[in-house]
Image (tube, helix red, strand yellow):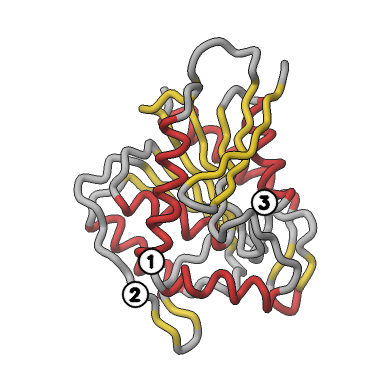
């Protein structure tokens, strides 16, 4: 195994992290990895590394530009909020990542999936909603609603003829997603004829896949059991849709 890593600048100043096993001949399925709200961090890049070791070409995208990564919740909110509220802008950025991965010489263009964490989970759902030829998306503890407090997102229509599948991996005790949010997205996906499934993990809060999440007051708690179960669910999902 010889892992190839490179930084790709795409769509003006967005900087993605591309990784794959260079000893595998020919093309292979690609998976986009969408980071959480603090930017493209080591957690997201390690997920990409793991996928590369499994034989995928993984592309850790950049939502904010210049590869920005911040430390505080306040900084993260300032970066995330404009994209959360302007879904067309968010869609444009994640579609740019899809196009970049699809054009790469080692990517099997007809077999592209996406995974995302927290804000990235919402982002991969938006990618699926765009109608690009995505095989499937996996949202790990994603933000599923369209409002933050009194702020309401400006949404965009669902693309026609969505063929990709969606797997939502959610913690039952996640304080950032309401029952109304869950019902609304389930209804939308059903009405649009999308192949969807949702796994809900009991006694599990938000950010359950992030080993450094330890903020009980805000409901951000790492859960190794739910992380393991959700990762296995993702592996089975991709095995099925890439078959």
Task: Please tell me which of labels 3 and 2 falls first in the chain.
Answer: 2
Q: Residue at the spot x=39%, y=71% of the render?
A: 86
Q: Residue reaching furthest front?
A: 12
**Left or right: where does residue 187 sit relative to residue 37?**
left
Query: Which labelled disc corresponds to residue 184?
Result: none
Reply above or below: 37 against 149.
above
Q: Residue reaching furthest bottom?
A: 150
Q: Which residue was labeled with disc 2?
A: 154
**Left or right: where does residue 216 sit relative to residue 229?**
right
C-alpha span from label 3 to label 2: 32 Å
Q: How would you rate the neighbour count of disc 2 (Cα within 10 Å): few for under 14, some for 14-19, many for 20 or more?
A: few
Task: Please tell me which of labels 1 and 2 falls first in the chain.
Answer: 1
C-alpha span from label 1 to label 2: 6 Å
Could you say whether the residue bearing mark 2 is in a helix, strand or loop? loop
Q: Where does the image place residue 81, in percent across and percent down from the top left?
A: 52, 74
Q: Residue reaching furthest top?
A: 25
Considering depth in this image, is 223 or 74 the residue closer to the camera?
A: 74
Q: Which residue was labeled with disc 1?
A: 87
Could you say whether the residue bearing mark 3 is in a helix, strand or loop? helix
Q: Which residue was labeled with disc 3?
A: 226
Q: Where does the image place residue 66, in percent across and percent down from the top left?
A: 61, 55
């Amino acid at each position: 195994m010889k892992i190839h890593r490179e930084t790709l600048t795409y769509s003006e100043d967005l900087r993605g992290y591309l990784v794959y096993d260079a000893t595998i001949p020919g093309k292979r399925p690609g998976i986009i990895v969408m980071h959480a709200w603090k930017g493209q961090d080591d957690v997201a890049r390690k997920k990409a590394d793991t996928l590369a070791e499994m034989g995928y070409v993984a592309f850790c995208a950049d939502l904010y530009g210049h590869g920005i990564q911040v430390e505080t919740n306040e900084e993260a909110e300032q970066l995330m909020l404009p994209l959360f509220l302007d879904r067309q802008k968010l869609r444009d950025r994640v579609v740019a990542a899809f196009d970049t991965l699809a054009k790469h010489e080692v990517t099997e263009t007809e077999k592209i999936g996406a995974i995302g964490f927290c804000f990235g989970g919402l982002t991969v759902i938006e990618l699926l909603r765009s109608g690009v030829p995505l095989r499937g998306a996996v949202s790990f503890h994603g933000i599923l609603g369209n409002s933050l407090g009194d702020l309401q997102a400006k949404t965009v229509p669902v693309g026609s003829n969505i063929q990709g599948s969606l797997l939502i991996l959610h913690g039952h005790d996640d304080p950032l997603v309401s029952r109304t949010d869950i019902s609304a997205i389930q209804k939308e996906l059903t009405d649009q004829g999308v192949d969807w499934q949702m796994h809900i993990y009991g006694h599990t809060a938000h950010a359950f896949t992030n080993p450094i999440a330890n903020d009980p007051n805000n409901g951000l708690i790492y859960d190794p059991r739910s992380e393991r179960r959700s990762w296995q669910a993702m592996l089975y999902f991709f095995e099925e849709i890439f078959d």
